[in-house]
Structure formats: structure tokens, C-alpha cells
Image: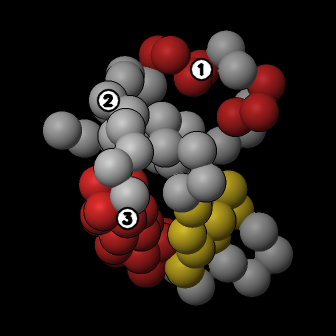
């Protein structure tokens, strides 16, 4: 299961949000660090949801988020 991510380029870092998992986000000093960091964030977030017996959102496709104004201008 792969979750789509939204990457925002900041002045000195890259922020990453996971639209399918509310509250799951990460960052990195460069693009590669951001991708590696968000993988860890997704794993940790899902682990906490399972431990707390909360529902884990299913991954959707990128198309579900393309028209969402919250994700305009992201990669």
C-alpha cells in the first residue's frame, strides 16, 4: 500500500504531508531526506493508530487530491 504525499519546497527545506493520514507529516533538508523521513513518519503514525485501536486510512490515488486547493502547487 503506497500513500500519496505532497511535497512543499520551503526556503531551506522540504515539507511533506500525507493527505490520506491526517496529522502525518515530515520534512527534510533536501528532496531525498524528505522522502526518507516521510516513509518513517508514515510507519510510525500507522503503528500508533494500530496501538490505539484506531482505524488506519486506506491509501488513495493521487487523483483524489489534485483538485484540492490545500495541495495546489505541491509536488
- In the rendering, at what x and y percent does residue 29 appear? 58, 85
Secondary element at tag 3: helix
- Return the residue nearer the eye: 18 or 57: 57
x then y, percent, for residue 53: 33, 49
Q: Is residue 74 left or right of residue 44?
A: right
Task: Work out whether residue 55 or residue 25 is closer to the camera in this orientation and state it.
Answer: 55
The C terminus lies in quadrant: top right
Residue at x-position 77% and y-position 68%: 10
From the top left corner, tell me how far across and down residue 24 is, in percent. Answer: 54, 57
Give the SS element for disc 1.
Answer: helix
Q: Quadrant of residue 25?
A: bottom right
Q: Please identify, in this view, whether the residue under mark 2 or under mark 1 is nearer the observer.
A: 2
Q: Is residue 70 left or right of residue 4?
A: right
Res 13 → quadrant: bottom right
Q: How is the image coloured?
A: secondary structure
Q: Specify the label residue 48 is tagged with.
A: 3
Q: Which is closer to the viewer, label 1 or label 3? A: 3
Q: Which residue is mark 2?
A: 58
Q: Is residue 28 above or below residue 65?
A: below
The CA span between labels 3 and 2 is 15 Å
Does residue 36 appear left or right of residue 10 in this picture? left
Marks 1 & 3, CB-CB < 8 Å contact: no
Residue drawn at x 67%, y 56% as measured from the top left: 8
Seen at 34% across and 40% down, the residue is 56
Tag of residue 66: 1
Residue 36 lies, in percent from the top left, at 34, 73
* Residue 7 appears in the rendering: no
- For residue 25, the mark is none
Mark 2 and mark 1 lie on one chain; the one further toward the N terminus is 2
| Quadrant of the rendering where the N terminus is positioned | top left
What secondary structure is marked by label 2?
loop
Q: What's the CA distance linking mark 1 and mark 3?
A: 28 Å
Amino acid at each position: 500500500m503506497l500513500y500519496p504525499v505532497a511535497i512543499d519546497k520551503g526556503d531551506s527545506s522540504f515539507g511533506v504531508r500525507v493527505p490520506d493520514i491526517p496529522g502525518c507529516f515530515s520534512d527534510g533538508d533536501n528532496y531525498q531526506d524528505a522522502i526518507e523521513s516521510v516513509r518513517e513518519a508514515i510507519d510510525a503514525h500507522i503503528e500508533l493508530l494500530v496501538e490505539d485501536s484506531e482505524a488506519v486510512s486506506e491509501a488513495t490515488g493521487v487523483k483524489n487530491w489534485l483538485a484540492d486547493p490545500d495541495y495546489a502547487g505541491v509536488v
